[in-house]
Amino acid sequence: MKQGSGFPWRLRAVYSRDKKWSNVVAGGACVVLGAALVGCGAPAQAAAKATHSPVTITLGGWTSSPVEAALMAKELTYFEKAYPWIHVNYRPISGNYEAVLKTRFVAGDAPDVIYVNNGGQSSSFMKNGDLLPLNKYIKASHFPLQDFFPGALNLFRYHGSVYGIPKDQSPLSLFYNPAMFRQAGIKSAPATWAQFAADAHRLTNTKLHRYGLINSAQEPRWAEFLYEAGGSVMNPAMTQMTLNTKAALQGFSFFVNLYRNGSAALPGTVGASWGGQAFGMQRAGMVLSGNWLVPFLEQTYPKTPFAVVPMPKGPKNAETLTFPVAYGITRDSTQPQASWDLIRYLTSRQGMTKWMNLGLALPARKSLLALPYYKQHPVLKGLLTDLPRSIPWTFPAGFSQLSSTTMTNETTLAIMGRETPAKALANMQQGGMAILHSGS
Amino acid sequence: MAGIEGAGSSSLPAVAKSNAFRRRARRELGVGYMFTLPSVLLLFLFTLGPALYSLYLSFFSWSLLNHMHFVGWKNFEQLFQMPLFWISVRNSVVFALVVVPTQTVIALGLAAILNQNLPARGFFRLAFFFPAVSSSAVISIIFMWIYNKFGLLNGFLSVFGIVGPDWLGNPQFALSSIMVLNIWTTSGYFMIVFLAGLQAIPAELYEASAIDGASRWKSFTHITVPLLSPSTFFIVVMGIVGTLQMFDQSFIMSQGTGGPLNSTTTIVLLIYQFIFSYGQVGYGAAATVLLFILILLATLATNWWFKRKLDYL
């Protein structure tokens, strides 16, 4: 946005108001400007820059806080320094991100570059051709993909094409309150299911409205137990529901029983709207959460002590879920090349390093696990340990109702004791299979 | 136009006069339409147009993102077989059945009391009317704090040794909690309507009934209530339409889920979820059509009921 870019900033201001109309104006101005620069005997570098006509692209995404938005804006100024002919309008979408994005798609006015979320609507976006396949651009710019966690990258692959380059991710780990552990006479964080259940029980004091674990009934808070018991929610190809196995029942029952025997509770029980808030309020000794809880606790509940350890090991595996987010280019983009330049910059080793040093999420690149930042922030060690062995979490297209409502309701019924865990799983299994059979 | 003028000039003066009158009337009509044009355009663009479009969409399968295709009555068939749809209908109807009579009676009571010569009458009128002009979203958030497990309501109850539930987190209480909030916000507005109606009742009727020896309660039930019928009709119809279309309070207080366990899923919230969350625009549009029919029938029934009573007057 500054003078170093070689183009008067005022020109760009005109630009962003109306893409199509000002394209002509600014394009023309650029030629004149380019000629003037050359004519004045400008340095060779400026002349090289002038060969690109200036373009403006829009970046849409969500933000967890104003802090994140400010950091992103800062990141984009670095990009504009490296690519002076590209101006990025950063337009975070507040509220229900994917619902708003869908309406923008319907209007044919989606941002050029968007955050592509795990789960949710991303599978539909890829299936319906709302995102551009990136293979062509990856090939043309020799952008290596080997360094990305394969699972994270696969989440944004559909029928062999890549639709998103992972920007970051956050695995689910166990956050605990060391002060509450000391009070309850527990020496170390739980490493196995048995210890986990025993600690949760010892931490619970219903008179003080304190519980061992507080998490919501949503599926990303219990699915990891299924995998640790050797089960799964769907087969890897996501063509079958696999909730009808013994292992799945074992994992699900373990989660449900924590609530049934009173050592775990739903957030509303302590007046919180989500598990992380209950943990911040010191109503929960433990909570399963991702990296996003770290800045939240530091900002909102600075007095709550916390530490993070990997998910306790299950009877079969030590596994957890991870939630990668990618950058993708929408089909409405008139500037796919400039959009790719932005994505390539932000997801490059350097770009991602800068983003990781802000501490909001964990890297999508394997090589960045060794970042010096993590030596200075040992609290993230538990999350980093969980990262390589975590399962990227998503559902196929057409599953949003099942994953957002049905699964939560069935789990709530099991937690309330109005349904057996087996019955709840059977209902989810049936619901999922019905969607798969209908071929939507 | 030219033809009429030609005919006028060659006819008798009386006919010419009537023609001129008709011409003027027609011109006035045109001017009238010109004046209403902005409103009519807005009505077509934002109300009738979308309504007709949703009728059209109810026969299509569309996810907002794919190509829509015609499916005939299939959306309606699917809806009728869907337990979730019937849950939402039950929630909305129960909500209307509880809220409309309650808020009407409370509004009438408040209006009757505040129509008396009481000290600080203006203050109370303002206090009861205030929720009606406040943002529904803001009020919902305030009530979320009140209904919190450790909120104001449970704090009050604990004085009496009662341990209150998590009002919005408990499927047994969630919808009732929203009903209370809704009654509180709308009663004040309808109170003003009743107040206006009360002031239109001639004082001599009360004087006459007093001379005849009627008690205050008798004159209330035999004069006030019947003569307020037009206001009551308006209030009941607006109440039915408003409650059957309730969305914002459920949406905010359940954080968009209609939970816990679908206990706060109203028809309109389900329509929103179908269209914007689940990518089933056809179901949402079909539910919209059914909601329209439901409201239409309820309004017609109310109309019929009050007409009968008004005729009797």
Image (tube, coloured by chain):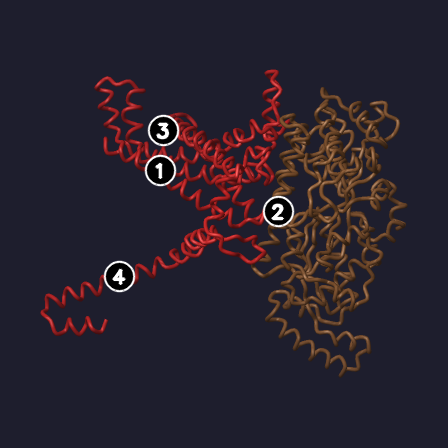
* Residue position for label 2: A437
* Residue position for label 1: B234
Q: Secondary structure at mark 4?
A: helix
Q: Position of residue A254 (x, y in %)?
A: 75, 30
- Chain letter of mark 2 equals A
Colour seen for chain A? brown
- Chain letter of mark 3 equals B
* Residue type at the position of mark 2: His
Q: Residue furthest top?
A: B161
Q: Secondary structure at mark 2?
A: helix
Above or below, A111 against A95 in this view is: below
Q: Quadrant of residue B152?
A: top right
Q: Position of residue A326 (x, y in %)?
A: 73, 54
Residue for point 60% across, 33% down = B260
* Residue type at the position of mark 4: Glu
The answer to whether the residue labelled 4 contacts the one labelled 2, judged by CB atoms less than 8 Å apart, is no
User: In the visual, does B91 lie left or right of A234?
Assistant: left
Q: Earlier in the sequence, mark 4 or mark 3?
A: 4
* Residue type at the position of mark 1: Phe
Q: Which mark is nearer the camera, 4 or 3?
A: 4
Q: Position of residue A375 (x, y in %)?
A: 90, 45
Q: Which mark is nearer the camera, 2 or 1?
A: 2
Above or below, A378 against B24 in this view is: above
Q: Which mark is residue A33?
A: none
CA separation in Å, label 1 and label 4:
32 Å
CA separation in Å, label 2 and label 1:
50 Å
Q: Nearer the viewer, residue A20 or A99?
A: A99
Q: Position of residue A358 (x, y in %)?
A: 80, 50
